[in-house]
Amino acid sequence: MYTLSAQLLIAAGGLTLYLVVKRWYKSIGSDAKSIPRAPGGHWLWGHEQDAWAKPNAGFYIDNFEKSGGQVFAMKGGMFSEDILAISDPAALSHMFTKHPYDYPKSAFIRPLVERLMGRSLPWAEGDEHKRQRAALAPVFTHENVKRAEPEVRDASEKLVNLLTEHINSKSTTKTGNDTVEINALDWACRATLQIIGSVGFGQDFELGESEDAKAIIASFHELVNVGMTSAGFIAPLVLRAFPFITDLPVKAIQAQGQVKLIVKRLAGVKVQEKRTMNDGSDMKGKDLLSTLLRMQDVRGNELDEILDQIAMFTLVGHETSAASLNFTLYNLAHNKPAQDRLRQELLAFPSGEPTYDDYLNRLPMLEAVAKESLRIFPPVMHTERVAMKDDVLPLRNSIRDPKTGKEMHNISIKKGQTIHVSHMAINRDKSVWGEDASEFKPERWMSTIPNTNNCEQGATHALPPPTGSTQGWNGTFTFLEGPRICIGLRLALFEYKVILADLIKNFEFLPVEGPDGLIETVFSSTGQPYVIGKKSEGVKIPLRNSIVTLGTAAKGGGTKVISAVVGSAFWVLSGIVADAELKSFGKHSPVVHASAGFDMITARWEVVDRETG
C-alpha cells in the first residue's frame, strides 16, 4: 500500500509524463520549431506571463518586430506545446474567412462563455453558428438599425444632461462651468446599456440608475477586476491544460453569470407581456426580442436560445461600445487639435442634427476619428484559436528559419495547435501602418492615396494597400473578419458616432496633467485601461471635463448646444474663403479652421472607406 506522499508523487510524475509526451507528439510534422521564437520564457508560465503582463499588446508587437515577420513561436505555460502568434493577413484569412470552423476557440472557453452568455452566437461553432448567424443577420440590416435611431438619440441626450448636471454640481464658480475631473468609464456605459436595453428587448435601464442596471455594470466590473489579477492569469492556463475541470460538479465552477440571469429574467417577463397583449399570435415591436420572436418558433429550447442571444447582446454590446467611446475620448483629450476639428465639423453641419444616413457618409472627420481610435484601441484585444486538424497556413509575407535560413511561404501545423491572435498588435503593426502605427492620427484616413510601398522606408500617415492588411473592417482586425465578424457592427458604430458627436458638441475633454493622466491597457475579457503604475487601483480613464460655452444653456436642466445657426454661419464663411487650403492639425486657431471651409473636407480630404463587413 502506497503512502499518501507516494501516491501524490506518482500522480505528479504521471501528469508530467503525459504533458511531455503530448508536447512531443504535437511537434511531429509541425513547423513550430522552424520559425522565429520569442527569447526567454518562464519555466512554468512560459511566455504567457510576459504576454499578459506587458501592456498594450507590447509582447506581441515587440516580438513580431524582432522576428522580422508576422509569425513567431512562444513557449506555452503549464508545459503545454509551443503557441504560434500570427498577424500575417493570408494566415488570418485562411483561419477566419476561408476555414473559420476549423479554428474554434480553445475547448475550455466554450463552457465559460455558456455560463456568462448562454448558448448564444459567441458560444456556437460549425453548423450551429451558421444557423444562429443566419437567424440573427436580418435583425442588423441598415433598415432595422435605422429604426433604432430614436432610442439611440434619446439615450445620448440623457447622457449629455446627466453629465452636465454632474459638472454643475461640482462647480465652485458662479458660472457653473468649472473643469471637473471624471473617470470616463463611469459615464458612457450608462448610455450604451440604455440603448441595448431599449433596442434589445424594450427595457428601460433608467440610464444606469435602475437596480438591474447597477447589478449588470457591477457584475461586469467584478469579472474584469478578477481578470486583472494573478488568479485571472493562471486560471485560463490551468483550464487549457485540464479542460475537464469546467465539467466538475462544483458550485463555484458551474455558477451562471449574473448578467445572463438578470437579462433572461427581464426579457422573459417581456415575452409574457407580449403574449398576453397579443394572444401569442403577433409579437409586435421593433426591438431585437420582438423581431426574433416573429421570425422563430417560440416554444421550448428555441425561446431559451432567444433569451440567451438577448443576454449576450446586453453584456457584449453595451460594454464594447462604451469601451470604444472611452478610448476615443482619451485620444481626443490628448489631441486637442483633432478634437477641435471634430467639434467644428459637427457644429457646422448644415441641417443641424445629422440623420442616420448622414452619419454613414457626410461627416468625414467623425469617420476618421472613429476608424483611427478603433484601430489603435480595439475593444477586444485578443483571441485564441485551436486547429481542429493538421493544416498548412499560407503566408503573404514569407519568414526564414532562424537555424537554416530557409525561406518559408507557409507553415505546417498539427491538430491541436494553439494560436494567439492579438487584434491590437495587428492594428499597430509598423510594417503595415508605418512607424507611427501606435499613434492616434485621424488624418491618415483623410487621404485618397494609399501607401503603395506597404509603409516601408519609414512612411507615415498613410493607409496600407489592401494587399498589406487584413480583410476585416477597413483593413483592421478590430471586429475580426469572415463569418465571425461582429454581427452588430452597424448598430455599434451608429450608437458610437451619435454619442461621441453629442459629447464633443457639448463638452470639452482635456487630459489630466502629469503621469496620473496616462493609461495602459491589459486584456481582461476585453481591453481594460488603468493609470500607468496604478494597475492595482482598477480600471480608469481619468479626464478633465467642462461644458462647451457655444450655444445656449438651459438652467436647471442639461446643456444642449444649439448648433444649427452656428453651423450655417460656418458654411457661409466656407463659401467666402473656399480657396483656403486645409492645413495639418494644430497650426491654426479654431476661427481659421472654421473659415477654411468644411466643404473642402469632403472635396479634398475624402475619407477612405474600405469596409468589407
Image (cartoon, helix red, strand yellow):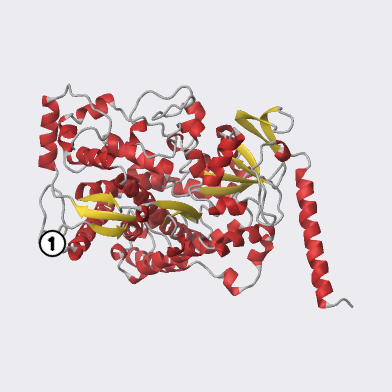
Q: Quadrant of residue 567?
A: top left
Is residue 163 shown above or below 505?
below
Rendered location of residue 191, percent (x, y)? 30, 57
- Pointer 1: residues within 10 angstroms few (<14), some, or many (20+)? few
- Residue linked to disc 1: 173
Label 1 secondary element: loop
Which residue is more in the foreground, 281 or 446? Answer: 446
Q: Does residue 534 appear to the left or right of 114 in the view shown?
A: left
Residue under the image location 66 percent in, 65 percent down: 245
Residue under the image location 57 percent in, 34 percent down: 88
Residue 174 seen anywhere in this rendered image of the structure: yes
Which residue is more in the foreground, 400 or 131? Answer: 400
The quadrant the N terminus occupies is bottom right
Residue 199 seen anywhere in this rendered image of the structure: no
Toward the front, the furthest residue is 514
Residue under the image location 82 percent in, 72 percent down: 7
Q: Quadrant of residue 529?
A: bottom left
Give the number of callouts. Answer: 1
Q: Does residue 369 appear to the left or right of 179 in the view shown?
A: right
The quadrant the C terminus occupies is top left
Rendered location of residue 161, percent (x, y)? 20, 58
Question: What type is the residue that disc 1 sits on?
Answer: Thr
Toward the right, the furthest residue is 1
Rendered location of residue 360, percent (x, y)? 31, 37
Residue under the image location 38 percent in, 23 percent down: 449
Is residue 61 shown above or below 512?
above
Rendered location of residue 288, percent (x, y)? 38, 54
